[in-house]
Image (cartoon, rainbow, N blue to C red):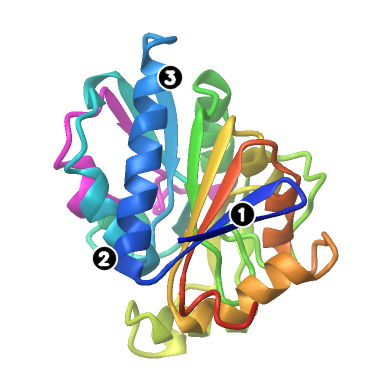
Amino acid sequence: MEEFTVDKLKVQVYDTNQLMGEAAAETISKKINELLKEKDQINIVFASAPSQEKFLEAIKKKDVDWSRVIAMHMDEYVGLPADAPQLFSNFLRDRLFEELPFKEVHYMNANADDPEQECERYAALLEKYPTDICILGIGENTHIAFNDPHVADFNDPKVVKLADLDEQNRQQQVNDGMFETIDDVPTHAITLTVPALIKSTYTYTIVPKEQKAEAIYNTLKTDIQEKFPSTALRQHPNAILYLDKGSASKL
C-alpha cells in the first residue's frame, strides 16, 4: 500500500480493488466500534454504486453491533418505478440493509409526489441524526453524491436538493451497466449537497478502476473548486481516499 496526503486528505493506494475494499472495511469497522464506545448509537450515510461492491462485501463480515447504527443513503434517482433495481435504495437494501440488523434504515422516496418536499423530509432526518461517518464514491466527472459540476455548490444553503444530471454522469450509469442506454437514465435525482457530505465527522471515499483515473487526477491535482466537486474532500479534517492501481494510474 502506498500512502500520501494532499492538503488534509489522506490517500491510500492498493494493488487491487479487492484489497482496497477490504482495507476500507477494516478501517471503517474499527472507527464504528471506536465511536460506539463513546455513543449509544451512530449514524452512517452510504454510497450506492458498483464501485462500492468489494467494500460492501467486506464490511458485512466485520464484527460490528449494527443494532446501534442508523443507516441512510446519499442520493436517489427520481422517476423510476419503486421496484427498479437501479434505485439506490434497492441497491443498498439488497446488498447491505436487509443483511445486517441496523437499528433504523431511512430511505429516500424516489416516487414522492413532491420531490422538493421529500428533500425537506430527508434533510430533517439528517438534522436529527447528524452524520458520524459518510462513505462516498467519486464519479467520472468528479461528482460526489449527485453533485455534478454544474450544480455543485460548496456553500449550498440546502442539506438535500433536487438536481439535474449532466450527460457525462448519465453516460457513466450506462458504462457501469446500470442502464442499457442513456435515454433510460433519469435526468434528475435527489442528493445530499456538498456541505452536507463534508459536514460528516469522518469521510471515507472508495474509488476503484481505471475509468476513474482522470477524475482522481482532477480530485488531487487541481485547485479546490466546484468545477471538480470531489476536490472539496481535501478540506475535510478526517478524510481518507481509497484507490486501486487503476484509479491511481494518472497520478
Kind of residue at badge 3? Leu
Secondary structure state at the residue bearing disc 3: helix
52 lies above or below 204: below
Whichever of callouts 3 and 2 sits on the residue coming sooner in the sequence is 3
Q: Which residue is mark 3?
A: 35
Q: Nearer the viewer, residue 168 or 208?
A: 208
124 lies above or below 233: above
- For the N terminus, give its image quadrant: bottom left
Magenta stretch contains residue 97: yes
38 lies above or below 198: above
Magenta part of the chain: 92-115
Q: Which residue is mark 1?
A: 162
Residue 86: image location, x then y, percent = 32, 67
Find residue 80 and report its image quarter.
bottom left
Residue 172: image location, x then y, percent = 48, 81
Structural distance between the alpha carbons of marks 3 and 2: 35 Å
Kind of residue at badge 2? Ala
Of badges 3 and 2, the one in the foreground is 3
Count of numbered tags: 3
